[in-house]
Amino acid sequence: MSMQGFQMDLVSEHRLSEMTPVEKVRFIIDEVKSGKILVLEKGLSPEEEASLIEMTMTLIEPDGFSGIEMESYPSEVDNSFIGKLLKKNSLKTRLTVIGPADQLKTLKKDRNMISALISTNK
Amino acid sequence: MGVIKKFKRNFSDVFKRLFKKQNARIGIYGPPNAGKTTLANRILRDWTGDAMGSVSNIAHETRRARRREGVTIKTNGSSITLDIIDTPGLATKIDFHEFMEQGMDEAESKRRAKEATEGVIEAVKWLENLDGVILVMDATEDPFTQVNVTVIGNMEARSLPLLIVANKVDLADAAPATIRDAFPQHPMVSISALEGKNIDTFYEELAKRFG
């Protein structure tokens, strides 16, 4: 009997940090379009999230890919002395889960908890 | 026209273009059906006498970003002039079947879905060209599940001002305090864009944050 299910990849901060922003977006899109659920240890920067949304929109097709579900905890602003000195906020991004919109559905989310339903039926 | 006169005029135009103070560009973002266009219409009706666009209960009614330049808001003896951009907001998924559930035929639903994706791309691109954001949230919905934190993150990363609006406080199940608790680092005003409730406080906060 073959096992039915979905593939979930837990992606370390180290793995993503080796990629450029463009590579990260491409990697995530390719994996999610192939039906995988990704859990990113440290999430994406706000700019990378915006790029991911933009690319997702360009790839949506009727009766095909309908987009992604992306949930992350709210990022935290690093109020360190250096950050203030440079007058640029450094954000501490946090765990993020991304998957195909027709398979992953967020049920509930608060500051420190994401509860999601993963469907094996497309 | 004399050469000197012409030179003077050209020089004056270039000078004006170089040093003209640009109005702060403020984008209105938020989840579908939170009341973004209702708020944009309220601002424009109050201060210019006309409206931004049509509203409906169907998600993605606004599928193109619309800009209105030079909206002057007077409050507490001071005045600010803003460019207001009503955006379709950021969505991560668009399924044409949702439009069909609202009674549209397949062709129309697919057309709308395509336009909606283009609208989201516009909303993403606008993020880079803004001086601040009004984030409209539905006070009757859970704050964390309705908001896409991308907009908040982008503003925070660039140290740009964000004003959170807890909308629909005219409804019995509105709970604006839960929105305040969810995002304590940003100022919040609770309003009803539809009925105008607390709108003066909103304008005061707008002037304070973006003036």
Image: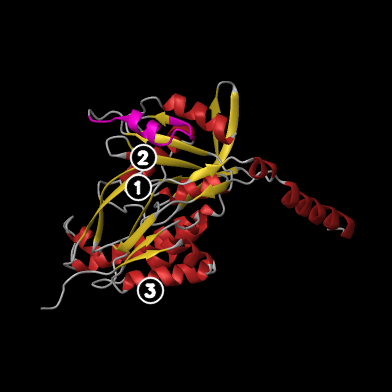
Residue beneath disc 3: A30
Identify which amino acid the numbered label 2 is placed on.
Met
Q: Are marks 2 and 1 on the same chain?
A: yes
Question: Is B179 covered by the magenta stretch?
Answer: yes
Residue B117: horizontal and vertical position, in percent? Answer: 37, 63
Residue beneath disc 1: B31
Give the quadrant of residue B120: bottom left
Identify which amino acid the numbered label 3 is placed on.
Asp
Disc ID at residue B11? none
Q: In this view, does B186 lie to the left or right of B20?
A: left
Task: Give SS at disc 2.
Answer: strand
Residue beneath disc 2: B137
Q: In this view, does B29 lie to the left or right of A3?
A: right
From this viewpoint, which residue is outermost toward the right? B4
Chain of the residue on which disc 1 is drawn: B
Residue B147: horizontal and vertical position, in percent? Answer: 36, 46
The residue shown at (39%, 55%) is A96
- Whole-number angstrom distance, CA of label 2 to CA of label 1: 7 Å
